[in-house]
Each structure stands twice: as C-alpha cells, then as structure tokens.
Image (cartoon, rainbow, N blue to C red):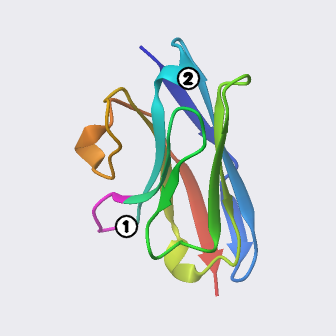
Amino acid sequence: QVQLVESGGGLVQAGGSLRLSCAASGGTFSNYRMGWFRQAPGKEREFVARINRSGVIVDYAESVKGRFTISRDNAKNTVSLQMNSLKPEDTAVYYCAARMGMTPSRIRDGYDYWGQGTQVIVSS
C-alpha cells in the first residue's frame, strides 16, 4: 500500500505559476501509474493529468493542456505538476493519485490511492 502526500499549493495571481509535488512511500513507486485530479467547491473531482510508470507517456485534460506539465522521478518517489499561466478557474484542491491497473485511466474510480490534497487559489 502506498501513501501519498502533496505539497506546493498556495495563493497566486492569475498568470502566475505553482509547482505541486507528491511524495510516495510504502510501496514500489515505479509500479504505479500516477495522476493529478482537482476539485473546486461545489463541483465533482475532475481529471487533470496522468503519467505512465516510466514517465514517457503523459495525458492532460483539455482545460490545462499547454499550461500544465506532469513529471515523475522514480528514484525519488515523486510526481510533480508544474502549473503555468494559472487562471482563476484553476482554483481547487489538487489531489495526487496512484493506480495499479494495467491500463491508463482518467477516471477517478480507477485510482487506488489518494493523497489528502493541497489547496490552490488563483486570484484575478
């Protein structure tokens, strides 16, 4: 079983940048496909980005494509989300998630382990 802890959230002005990190422990990190999701107040948790086990294949929600970059370091058991050109609509709690399945997934229920989340607030 893997434990996930996010960090790096905060308050930023529109157009600014933040880098979120997720540290994994308690499992073999390279066995997991990793994803980032977010949940804004009153909304469902939504897919943001995912990365395969080796870090070669990535996928993004249309709303963040070209602005966000997901990456992982299997030697350090971390996955990161670089967020640039932030918009007020990016305001949400951001969650890191790990998936053991053999296929990629954008679905919340497809992930087995979750972090506690980190708050991102983008002011206009």
- State the image coordinates of residue 47 (x, y, percent, origin top left): 38, 58
Numbered circle sitting on residue 30:
2
- Mark 2 residue type: Ser
Q: Is the stretch drawn in magenta largely helix, strand or loop?
A: loop
Residue plotted at (60% across, 44% down): 56
* Cα–Cα gap, marks 2 and 1: 32 Å
Where 23 sits versus 122, above or below? above
Please identify the residue farthest to the front as the structure is shown: 56
Q: Is residue 30 visible?
A: yes
Q: Is residue 31 left or right of residue 109?
A: right
- What residue does disc 1 label? 41
The C terminus: image quadrant = bottom right
- Mark 1 residue type: Pro
Disc 2 crowd, CA 10 A, few/some/many (<14, 14-19, 20+): some
Q: Nearer the viewer, residue 28 or 108?
A: 28
- State the image coordinates of residue 103 (x, y, percent, origin top left): 31, 38
**What range is drawn magenta here?**
41-46
Element type where label 2 sits in the image: helix
